[in-house]
Image: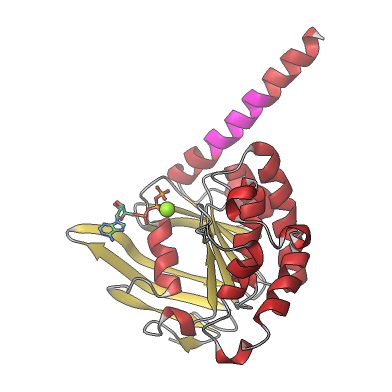
Amino acid sequence: MGTLNSGAKLCVCHCSKRYGDQQILQDVSFTVQDGEFLSILGPSGCGKTTLLRILTGLVRPDEGTVLKDGQDITHLPPDRRKIGIVFQNYALFENMTVLKNVAYALRFHDAFRGKEQSMAKEILERVGMGDSLEKYPGQLSGGQQQRTAIARTLVMNPDIILFDEPMAALDAENRLALRDELKKLQREFASTILYVTHDQEEAFALSDRIMVLEQGRIHQLDTPENLLRHPADSYVERFVGQNLLRRLGDLQRFAGMAGKL
Ligand SMILES: Nc1ncnc2c1ncn2[C@@H]1O[C@H](COP(=O)(O)OP(=O)(O)OP(=O)(O)O)[C@@H](O)[C@H]1O
Ligand SMILES: [Mg+2]
């Protein structure tokens, strides 16, 4: 086992998962370095969320192991992994204030007893939510709700943060704002991040490396530049190429519009 995990923060070794007769993940192996921002791209149903659920401990792989800092965590319960997750739909408690939502996450840990409110407040200030501590989720914009959800994950000081399409419910403006914020937070907290998105542009802008997953199989895990320059196979070429063509189309339309001005 020593071969795959030399110095890696996270190592997924030969993980497979089936539901009934459907093979969801097929012999998935990869490593993530400490402080790396790794995005996972792939069509709907290809196994992205299942992979994150295996990492959080909510789902057991049928085969394979997960190592964190070289330690086998495959059978460790979710609350002992120090791996946090942020979902698309925020999953905030509607009947609790922003402050309470974040403090609540600390309630079940003896080490934080008595410090819940002050720790929650500090993190909320750092994600730009210091003015909204007493508001309820229903009084917040989508972007503010997602910041609160991110604070709730950060306050637990996870070693690794997983994001499952965190921007999917946001409008374009909020997406861009939160994208910058994420990059800043990653630098500030030196977090290791796995980031699932359908937005290729987002993945290319944020990531050190990108994984292209299809039908539970990794086609390529590489730097954004290498995905473009040296696609591993025709699937990646088409997948990334289509994205480029779309962007080129946008540019041409934009140029066309500019020409008419
Ligand atoms: N608990 C489950 N029981 C049975 N099948 C499941 C279960 N969870 C997921 N699946 C199936 O596994 C496949 C992969 O699902 P998953 O949620 O990992 O896809 P995804 O890549 O996250 O898709 P999306 O981009 O739409 O979120 C799907 O076909 C899904 O129906
Ligand atoms: Mg999903």
Overall secondary structure of the magenta section: helix
Image quarter for residue 188?
A: bottom right
Magenta residues? 241-250
**What x and y, as percent, mark residue 4?**
49, 79
**What x and y, as percent, mark residue 21?**
17, 58
In the rendered image, which quarter contains the C terminus? Answer: top right
Q: Residue furthest bottom?
A: 111
**What x and y, as percent, mark residue 166?**
56, 53
Q: Nearer the viewer, residue 11 or 157?
A: 157
* Residue 159 higher or lower than 179, as above or below: below
Image quarter for residue 25?
A: bottom left
Residue 20 located within the stretch drawn in magenta: no
Residue at 50% x, 58% y: name it: 91
Residue at 78% x, 58% y: name it: 131
Q: Nearer the viewer, residue 245 or 25?
A: 25
Q: Quadrant of ligand 1?
A: bottom left
Q: Is residue 47 left or right of residue 251?
A: left
* Residue 202 higher or lower than 196, as above or below: above
Q: Is residue 14 left or right of residue 33?
A: left
In the rendered image, which quarter contains the N terminus? Answer: bottom left
Residue 247 located within the stretch drawn in magenta: yes
Image quarter for residue 97?
A: bottom right
Q: Residue furthest left?
A: 21
**What x and y, as percent, mark residue 175?**
66, 45
The chosen color scheme is secondary structure
- Is residue 225 in sight in this rendering? no
- Is residue 250 in sight in this rendering? yes
